[in-house]
Amino acid sequence: MPREFRQAKWPEPLIFELPKGRKETFRIDDEFRSEAREALERIPAELVRESGPGIPNLSEVEVIRHYTRLSQMAYGVDQGPVPLGSCTMKYNPKIDEELASLPQVTNIHPYQDEDTVQGILEILYLMQKWLAKITGADLCSLQPPAGAAGELTGALIIRKYLHDKGLLSKDEMIVPESAHGTNPASAVMAGFKVVKVPADADGNTDLDALKAVVGEKTAGIMLTNPSTLGLFESRILEISDLIHGAGGILYYDGANLNGILGVSRPGDMGFDIIHLNLHKTFAAPHGGGGPGAGAVCVKKELTNYLPVPVVDYDGSKYFLNYDLSRTIGMTSWFYGNAVPIVKSFIYLAMLGPSLREVAEISVLNTNYLMSKLVKLPGVSLIYGEGRWRKHEVVISFDRLHKDTGVSAEDIAKALLDRGFHAPTIYFPLIVPEAHMIELTETETKEKIDELARAYEEIVNIAYRNPQELKEAPRNTAIGRLDALLGNHPKTVTPTYKYVGRIRKTGSS
Ligand SMILES: *Cc1c(COP(=O)(O)O)cnc(C)c1O
């Protein structure tokens, strides 16, 4: 039996609103006091404040308890699974944090002499090489600080490359309907028009629809494979021939490489540009734990277009190479977010040749869970019935919703009550009442069984007493928030008062 899940309860006042503890929580030494007075006298009168700063006057223990209570109202992957599809929330080994926090990493400056930072340059150089090898590309830039920044970098490379070839009329970027929202956004920011293509019943890109839109104006296609449905694009080589045949470029959204890591490579599938989310697949924390890193890898013909600098090695020394003839310029600062790159470097160095097991175990975990969930009443797959999944699976509660009125959101809230972070919901948009579940290689069979049991219990309640699920969650720090109000620009930074108001009005 799983232990009952119960989170510390809201409210916790802001630290400014905590009852004042002892009047004087620290003492200023008399000698210092007179020194301070002398110093004060030298400050021009108009600059001296009239009253003390409004900072909380609390003792250390009061501060620690306040933040500990807050941390007990939060949930993270160190407590239990975060099965957020498309986000690859794997456990981040603590050794990565420990080594990346060394002063040799955190206290160096990009303007230091190269001679004094040979160690970090070697790490960056090796990462450029390893990621190129993993993706089947020729050179990687570590500069983009996020996946979306990597996409924009890639799209700008495509544009400059096509312009260099005099192909100014190529201004259409093909993006599948199931794509991550950042894909069309990046294409538009780089100056392309977006052309959508649907998925077929198997969950592959609909080839007939694709053929109908590929033509002279095609600049390229942005694809993720496995797709956001967790399905491997089985006719990827045909797609690649089709796009290349029209003079277009294949862009690979590799935010979620988990399902094929060490097994297959985008470069071998015909992709020319690939971005990777080091803060997903490669174990750098994200989702509030940031910052990220969105490496971009390219095939030989495009290496000169990468952002500068890239790290090079002349046989005796590592150096920053700004000399790429067709570079699109800098897309971020120096070599990007170096600290998460170091975390990913350690993760890869530890895995070494067993890298492939990441894919094998995460795929096994996903399919094991899927095999249990598809047996539940009211659950269906919509796309790719009978196919194995890769890193994630998208299930639909459309039937359950029609039968009982219980929505994908209600089920997600009920999962919270059972000690699980909710999966990604209502995405991709082509699946109604969707739960997009990704377990990664770091979850155990016992945890997956527990998650499957939680789903089973919730589905049974939906058919027996749907109202109970409308009132979930009960065991979390706060009950159901008003999602609409929660997304309102004025409540983007919720304060104690706002949350208080949301609770009073209740959910709609
Ligand atoms: C997360 C993700 C992105 C965007 O990455 P960010 O680092 O959040 O900008 C792009 N594509 C897919 C498929 C993703 O899952």
Image (cartoon, grey):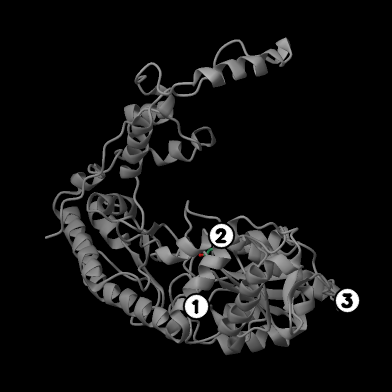
Q: Is residue 259 above or below residue 28?
A: below
- For this view, does 130 lie left or right of residue 462? right
Q: Residue at x 25, y 69 (%)?
A: 448
Q: How far apart are marks 3 and 1 (CA)?
A: 43 Å
- For this view, does 217 lie left or right of residue 107? right
Q: Which numbered dot is residue 382?
A: none
**Which of 101 and 148 lies nearest the eye of the viewer?**
101
Q: Mark 3 points at which residue?
A: 166
Of tags 3 and 2, the one toward the viewer is 2
Q: Residue 179: where, in percent of width, then height?
A: 54, 67
Q: Which of marks 2 and 1 is nearer the N terminus?
A: 2
**Residue type highlighted by circle 3:** Gly
Q: Residues within 10 Å of mark 2 (few under 14, many from 20)?
A: many
> Quadrant holding ligand 1?
bottom right
Q: Earlier in the sequence, mark 3 or mark 1?
A: 3
Q: Quadrant of residue 56?
A: top left
Q: Mark 2 points at which residue?
A: 292
**The N terminus is located in which quarter?**
bottom left
Of tags 2 and 1, the one toward the viewer is 1
Q: Does the residue labelled 2 lie within 8 Å of ligand 1?
A: yes
**Which of 385 and 25 lies nearest the eye of the viewer?**
25
User: Quick check: can you spot residue 508?
Assistant: no
Q: Mark 1 points at which residue?
A: 349
